[in-house]
Image (cartoon, grey):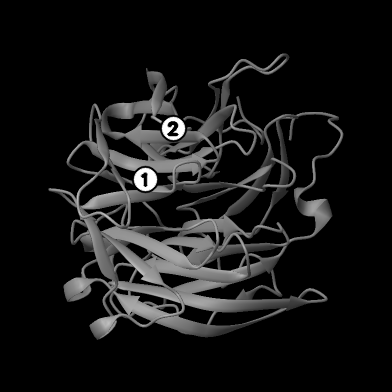
């Protein structure tokens, strides 16, 4: 199934785009001081327009973003670095917006109170794995941090204790995880996907093979916690329900394809207010989608670099996305000195609000 025009059979290629624009829309705002290496994640605070990025240069950076009448401005607020400038792969906020938890190549789970500058600029370590940690989330019902690692474990942390309060064995390495309320979804190597109820003791609800034929790249839980969207390296997204919803069935669709070329879906993020979502990919394209009506709401022009990650703010009127190498073609295609940029787009209602369905688009 495709929301767009049917795509021809395509051979998998790496991440290079045909775009010439620097940003997806002409008035998108470029954040200052976005870092010196690939951008691995961007997240918004749940309580303010504070944006945090993680980078392969070891940095965790925070900006204060202001929007007025569609005009955007941002100021760098603070920065910390993981030990030995080890790559940082993911981060998450505490529900009150005061604390950022980050993970990465140093195998550590770290905690940064945004109101304080830690000693030597290195955030406090609160946990560890035996292998690099790919993803992190916060469980609001239990106030625990969850980390997913290439050591095939999920570990659960109380920031006040040095040892994990629990752990779960995964079938393979963790590639991505997402927490939304009491729902947690985990995408692993080998195309395994697990879904949990994390209200209290984590309860496994689903353990299945991805509906997509190629490696999982990203996963995001629905805002209503009934299921998830998973993206693959082969330009497809699977919409999967964990809880049966009347009139809604799981399905998959093609995206991020140009002519005979296929690109990875690097990130999926949902708009909290409308339940619609964005995908970004190795083709340098931002797309807004409506899963319920099976429509593409907005397709932006491709930019001149791959887009590695993206995020809607809590209010849903700002959408941040990174212009940065996504490493999908390895170190041989990395060009040192290439700028890494984070853009903020002012989201109009007509771009992201569901439309009455007329036909597939």
**Which residue lies at the image location 33% right of the left edge and 26% below the top edge?**
192
Q: Nearer the viewer, residue 312 or 239?
A: 312
**Which residue lies at the image location 40% right of the left edge and 24% below the top edge?**
203
What secondary structure is marked by label 2? Answer: loop
The image quadrant of residue 227 is top right
Q: Quadrant of the C terminus?
A: top right
Whole-percent x and y of residue 10? 44, 35
Mark closer to the chain start, 2 or 1: 1
Q: Is residue 17 above or below residue 152?
A: below
Q: Quadrant of the N terminus?
A: top right
Q: Is residue 212 above or below residue 148?
A: above
Specify the label residue 13 is tagged with: 1
Specify the label residue 200 is tagged with: 2
| Res 21 seen here | no
What secondary structure is marked by label 1? Answer: loop
Q: Nearer the viewer, residue 74 or 93?
A: 93
Whole-percent x and y of residue 177? 40, 41
Count of numbered tags? 2
Q: Residues within 10 Å of mark 2 (few under 14, many from 20)?
A: few
């Amino acid at each position: 199934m495709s929301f767009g025009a049917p795509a021809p059979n395509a051979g998998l290629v790496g991440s290079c785009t045909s775009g010439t624009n620097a940003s997806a829309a002409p008035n998108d705002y470029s954040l200052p001081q976005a870092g010196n290496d690939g951008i691995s994640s961007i997240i918004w605070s749940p309580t303010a327009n504070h944006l945090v990025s993680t980078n392969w240069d070891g940095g965790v950076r925070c900006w204060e973003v202001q929007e007025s009448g569609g005009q955007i401005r941002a100021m760098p607020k603070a920065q910390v670095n993981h030990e030995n400038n080890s790559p940082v792969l993911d981060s998450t906020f505490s529900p009150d917006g005061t604390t950022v938890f980050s993970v990465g190549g140093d195998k550590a789970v770290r905690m940064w109170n945004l109101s304080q500058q830690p000693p030597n600029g290195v955030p406090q370590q609160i946990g560890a794995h035996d292998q690099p940690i790919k993803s992190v989330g916060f469980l609001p019902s239990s106030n625990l941090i969850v980390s997913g690692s290439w050591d095939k474990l999920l570990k659960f942390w109380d920031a006040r204790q040095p040892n994990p309060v629990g752990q779960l064995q995964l079938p393979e390495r963790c590639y991505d995880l997402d927490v939304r309320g009491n729902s947690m979804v985990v995408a692993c190597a080998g195309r395994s996907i697990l879904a949990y109820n994390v209200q209290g003791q984590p309860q496994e609800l689903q353990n299945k093979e991805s509906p997509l034929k190629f490696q999982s790249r990203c996963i995001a839980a629905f805002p209503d916690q009934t299921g998830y969207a998973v993206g693959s390296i082969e330009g497809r997204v699977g919409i999967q329900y964990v809880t049966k919803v009347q009139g809604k069935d799981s399905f998959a669709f093609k995206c991020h394809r140009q002519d005979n070329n296929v690109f990875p879906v690097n990130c999926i993020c949902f708009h909290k207010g409308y339940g619609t979502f964005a995908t970004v990919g190795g083709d340098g394209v931002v797309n807004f989608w409506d899963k319920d009506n099976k429509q593409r709401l907005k397709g932006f022009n491709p930019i001149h670099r791959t887009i590695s990650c993206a995020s809607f703010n809590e209010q849903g009127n700002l959408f941040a996305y990174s212009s940065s190498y996504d490493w999908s073609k390895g170190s041989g295609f990395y060009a040192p000195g290439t700028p890494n940029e984070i853009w903020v787009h002012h989201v109009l209602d007509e771009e992201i609000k569901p439309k009455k369905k007329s036909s597939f688009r």
